Image: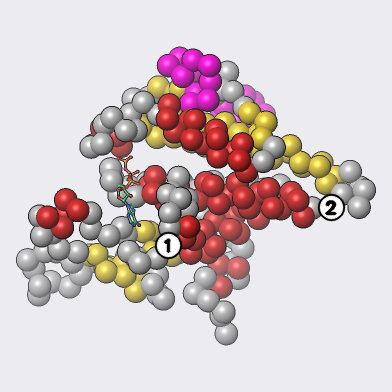
Amino acid sequence: SPKNRFDHFSQKPSECVKVVVRCRPLNEREKALSSKMVVSMDVQRCQCFIKKPGAADEPPKQFTFDGTYFIDQTTEQLYNEIAYPLIEGVTEGYNGTIFAYGQTGSGKSFTMQGVSEPAAQRGVIPRAFEHIFESIQCAEGTKFLVRGSYLEIYNEDIRDLLGSDTKQRLELKEHPERGVYVRDLTTHTLHSVGECERIMEQGWRNRAVGCTLMNKDSSRSHSIFTIHLEICNTGKH
Ligand SMILES: Nc1ncnc2c1ncn2[C@@H]1O[C@H](COP(=O)(O)OP(=O)(O)OP(=O)(O)O)[C@@H](O)[C@H]1O
C-alpha cells in the first residue's frame, strides 16, 4: 500500500512534468474587504474545487493535479514531496526545472524565495542550495563544481541580475549543440550554502520591479535562477 499520497509518482518514472497547485491564505486587504474563500481542496486526492460566489446551487469546478497545497501546508512539505526528488536527480546529472506561475500576489516568491521565519516556510531555492551541498559532502570519489546565474526577463528584455551592469540588455542566442542560451550572462562559482544565499539576495535586490511595482505590472517580470553542477568521478574513495 502507498506510504503517502505521492508514492504513485515513483511508480511512474515516465511522468517527467508534474503540476501542483498551492493556495495562499486570504491577505489583510482581502480580509478587510470580507472576501470569501472560493477555493477548497481534497489534498489526499490532489483535487482543487472552485465555487462561484453567490451561486450556491452550482456545483464547484473541479481540477485534478499531481499535488495540492492548501493554506495550512508549508513549503517544507512541498519541497519534500515535489522538489526533493527533482534535486536528487540533478545531483545525479539530470536536468531539472521548477517553475512557478500565477497572478500577481499569488505567492510565487513566497514559495520560491521564501521567508526565513517560520523555518517551515523557507523557500524552494534556499532548500535546493542546502540539498545540493549536503549531497556534495556525502559523495565519495566525486568532485563537484557548482555555479550559479540569475537573470530577469522584463518586457521581453533579459538582464543579468548578478552582472556588473544590471541595466544592460542581454541577447538570447541559439547554439547548434547547447541549445538556447543568454550571451554574456555571468556565472558565479559557489562554494557554500552561504555564498548561494548571498547571490540570491543580491540578485533579488537588483530586480528593479520587485519592490516598486506591487501590482499587476510586477507580474511582467520573470526571473530564472540556474544552478549548474559539474560532476567528475575521481575514482578515489
Ligand atoms: N502560502 C502562503 N502563506 C502565507 N502567506 C503567503 C503565502 N503565499 C503568499 N503569501 C503572502 O502573500 C503576499 C504575496 O506573495 P508573493 O509576493 O510571493 O506573490 P507573487 O506571486 O510573487 O507576486 P508578484 O507576481 O507580484 O511578484 C506576500 O506578502 C506573501 O508573504
Spatial separation of the CA atoms under disc 1 and disc 2: 33 Å
Quarter of the N terminus within the rendering: bottom right
Q: Secondary structure at mark 1?
A: loop
Q: Which residue is mark 1?
A: 74
Image vertical order of residue 71 relative to residue 172, above or below: below
Residue type indicated by callout 2: Glu
Q: Residues within 10 Å of mark 1 (few under 14, many from 20)?
A: some
| Residue range highlighted in magenta | 160-181
Q: Is residue 235 left or right of residue 119?
A: right
- Residue 48 is situated, as x and y percent measured from the top left of the image, at 31, 67
Give the residue drawn at x 67%, y 41%: 192
Q: Which residue is mark 2?
A: 140
Give the residue drawn at x 39%, y 49%: 110
Image vertical order of residue 50 relative to residue 86, above or below: below
Q: Secondary structure at mark 2?
A: loop
- Residue 7 is situated, as x and y percent measured from the top left of the image, at 56, 73
Res 95 seen here: yes
Res 64 seen here: no
Q: Nearer the viewer, residue 197 or 125?
A: 197
Give the residue drawn at x 59%, y 54%: 86
